[in-house]
Structures are given as C-alpha cells and as structure tokens.
Image (cartoon, rainbow, N blue to C red):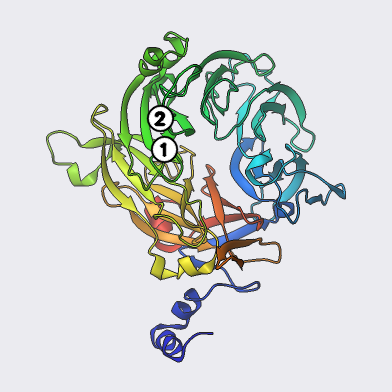
Amino acid sequence: MISRFKLAMCLWVSFSACANAQSPAVGAPPEASNMKLVGSSDLQARSAYQPTIHHQGERWIAYIGHHGGTDDIPAPVNTQTGKAEPNGTSIVDVTDPAQPKYLRHIPGQEGKYEAGGAQMVRICDGKALPKGDKSAVYMLRSFGGEAHEIWNVADPANPVLVTRIGGLKDTHKNWWECDTGIAFLVSGAPDWRTRRMTQVYDLSDPANPKKIRDFGLPGQEPGADGAVPTELHGPISTGPEGNRVYFGYGTNKGGFLQIVDREKLLNGPKEPTPDNLRLPEISRLAMSAFNGAHTVFPMKGMPIAEFAKDKDGKTRDIVMIVDEAILNECAEPRQMVWFADVTVENRPMMISSFTVPESSGSFCERGGRFGSHSSNESMAPVYYKKMAFIAFFNAGVRALDIRDPYQPKEVGYFIPSITAATDKRCVTVDGKDRCKTAIQTNNVETDERGYIYIVDRANTGLHILELTGAARSVAGVP
C-alpha cells in the first residue's frame, strides 16, 4: 500500500506522477510522451529479440527473432497450426501498421531463454547481393547457439531453407552487408577459447557460403593461454566506402569499442595468431569495469551546429554505445547510453551519456530489468544522425534528440501496457523468490516511413509507434 504521506504527495504533484510511482497492472494504459501506439501483435506470446523491417515489393514485412521459451512455457503454441513450437522467427506483414498480419512462425532451436530460439535476423534482397538469386529475398538468422541459417522469404508466408552454417557453440548479433554480401557472424567456434567471436563469411551467393576468416581478440584464439579477454557482442560495418567495422565487446561490464580497418580484416593474413588479430585494429575505447558494449552504432560526419563557426571540426565522427542491463531490480551498476567522438580514430573519447532517471518512474521497484539494452540500427535518412531510439526494459523505449551528441536530450518515450501474457521476473530475497510482472522492452528498430517498432522480452509482443508533438518536429517528420 502507498503510505498516506506518499499518497498526499502524489495528489499534490499530479495524478500521473502518482501512477508512475506504482508498478503498472494488467489493463492500465500505456505511459507515453510525444509517442503514440499505432498497432500491435502479440507475437504468439514469444520472448522477442531483434526486429528487422524490410520494404519488400509493395509490402513492409517485419522479421522478428526470438529467445528460447520459459520454464513455464518452453514451447508456446503456434496459433496458426495449433501445435507447440520452440521459439524461432516471427514474420509479420506491417504494410498497414495499424493492422499487423501475422504470416508465419519458423521454429528455432529447442531450449529455454538464451539456450534456444533464433534471436538474430538480417534481410538482403537477392537483387542487391552480387551473386544472389534476383527473385529471392534472403533472411539470415541465428539458430539457437548451434548454427546460422539462410532462408528465402520472397514469399514471407512460405519461407524455404537455403543453407546452414553449423557446428557452433554460440551465436548472436550478426551484421550483413547487402551490397557486398560480406557477413560478420557472431559465433562460438568450438576451438576458440571464448563463447563469442567473429566469423567473416562471403554470403554474396547465399546458397554457397564461403568462409573468409575467424577473428577475435588476442588471447581468445585456439592454443592461447592466460586470461581470456571479454567476449564479442556484435559488430556494425560501414562497408567498403567507410572501410570500418565497429565491434562492441562485453555486455554489462568491462567492455570496449574496437575500431577495425575493414580492408585489412578481409584481406590481411588469416591465420589467427596474436599479430594477425592485432593487424586490422585501429584503436579501442575502454569502458568502465561497470559497463559493457551491446550496440556500437556509427554516425560519421555529423554536423555539429555548436561548432559551425569553428575553424576545424565542424563535423565529427560519433559512435553511440549502448550497454545491456542483465540483472533484475537494479542489482548491478546502471547500464546506459554513451556517445564517443572517434574523429581522431587513434584517440577516441567519451563526450556524453544518457540514462532514464530512476525516480521518474520508480523503475527499480517495478520488477524486471531497468537500464539500456539496444538502439535502432537503421541508417535510413528519416532518423539517422537526428534521433535515436533506445530500448530501456521496464522504462520502455526512449526517443533521443542526438543532433548535438555532446548534449543528447530525451524528447519522448513509450512504455507499453502489461497484458495477461506478460511474464514475471523474479529476484531472490531471504532465500525466497519475489516475482513481479513488468514490461521488458528489449529491442527497437525503425523503418524508412518513420514508424518505430519495439519488442518485449517478457512475452508482451510487438508495438508499432509513431512520434507526436515536439519529438516529431525534432525529426522533421511531416
């Protein structure tokens, strides 16, 4: 119960402030500022990870990766077939974002939580790939921890498996260049000493994958000894024109940003010796022992209005670094968003940060994770270098004005409503589990139309949003 004093304070401040101080319940409305709900899909109550939105002919299709099942429901029922299936990939037609149409579920690896499912998904048109089938649309997805798969989803309701890269011990957050076919696959090669490193593949002909090399940090390679450096989380490449690959290591502690010369990575000596692994590296930016690097999102050549009259440095190369919170109810240091100036590549430096104020919603008390997880990764002009959207678990998605990355500003947010499908999150107190039901906005993506797509780790589904008010003005969206 709320104390009389707290209740009085809530009444004195505002009804909405009082509502924010309590954990929302099933049936309570969403919490929002300058963002509104357009449409939603329950995704068959499957825990969701990466959404990728693809303009496919005259349609817009959302491809959504899933974690494995839960202890209570290891294999949810596919409502289209009536059969229980391990979590895998959901395919949803979002051409009309107000009325999403669930098209297909492709089962993933059996297993619960991180041990199953098919978390990661990327899409390339066959006509864009140098050696692809011009009539195909290819979906690259992880398959639990054991493989990467490529499917032809030209007919998204009837996908066809094309090829499989197997024999792995883990997978995660891949990157695929559609114009070259080069893929940076986050893998666990059995002979490497770390759970996750990089396997570089030529997937320009998806039916015939060609491995280029294995890559990681010195000390992770086969035959090394001593301490094993922190594992990879995910890369983002700027392609041959930008000639850089940005790697994020660590999840919620001891992480860093690594800047790599793409040409040297692809064409340098391939044997994984310490010297060969160091060769492509330009620099690193170490994080605190408190923080990791889940997403490292490059924004090169950003015009900075504040520096417009300066002789030099009117534009800056920026990398946004997003940590991942992994423990419930704030049982770890705060994971947040950081902005690094990498204009001088061998001397990268942190310039600013962002977090949601905990007191704005009593988020440590709501249950589940509170802190950042991921950002949108689309580089479409509608938002690129202007706005970023950050998944913040029980604080929903946050819209940031990043036109001045030295001073990022929140201009909107959306916290979805809890539903009957929303899963509980527990902590152990005095030897007993204390469980709360909380929104866990896990990942976010945008499309070229300006819609924002968020998915929930706690089985609450997909929410399609749009900006309103001041946030819409910041983005310059009509």
Using a 10 Å C-alpha cutoff, classify the residue at mark 1 as few (fewer than 14 neighbours), some (14 to 19) or many (20 or more): many
Which is nearer the N-term, disc 1 or disc 2? 2
**Measured from the top left, where is residue 310 in percent x and y?**
13, 39
Q: Is residue 63 visible?
A: no
**Measured from the top left, where is residue 211 in percent x and y?**
58, 14
Marks 1,2: beta carbons within 8 A: yes
**Measured from the top left, where is residue 403 in percent x and y?**
32, 47
Residue denoted by label 2:
246
Residue sitting at 20 percent across and 37 percent down? Answer: 314
Q: Which mark is residue 201?
A: none
Q: Would you say 359 lies left or right of 74 here?
A: left
Question: 123 above or below 451?
Answer: above
- Residue type indicated by callout 1: Val
- Residue type indicated by callout 2: Tyr
Q: Would you say 462 lies left or right of 314 here?
A: right
Q: How many marks do you count on the picture?
A: 2
Check disc 1 and report its element: helix, strand or loop.
Answer: strand
**Toward which corner of the image does residue 207 lie, by quadrant?**
top right
**Toward which corner of the image does residue 253 lie, by quadrant?**
top left
Q: Would you say 144 lies left or right of 37 here?
A: right
Distance between the Cα atoms at labels 1 and 2? 6 Å
Residue denoted by label 1:
296
Q: Residue furthest right?
A: 82
Which image quarter is the N terminus in?
A: bottom right
**Measured from the top left, where is residue 266 in percent x and y?**
46, 14
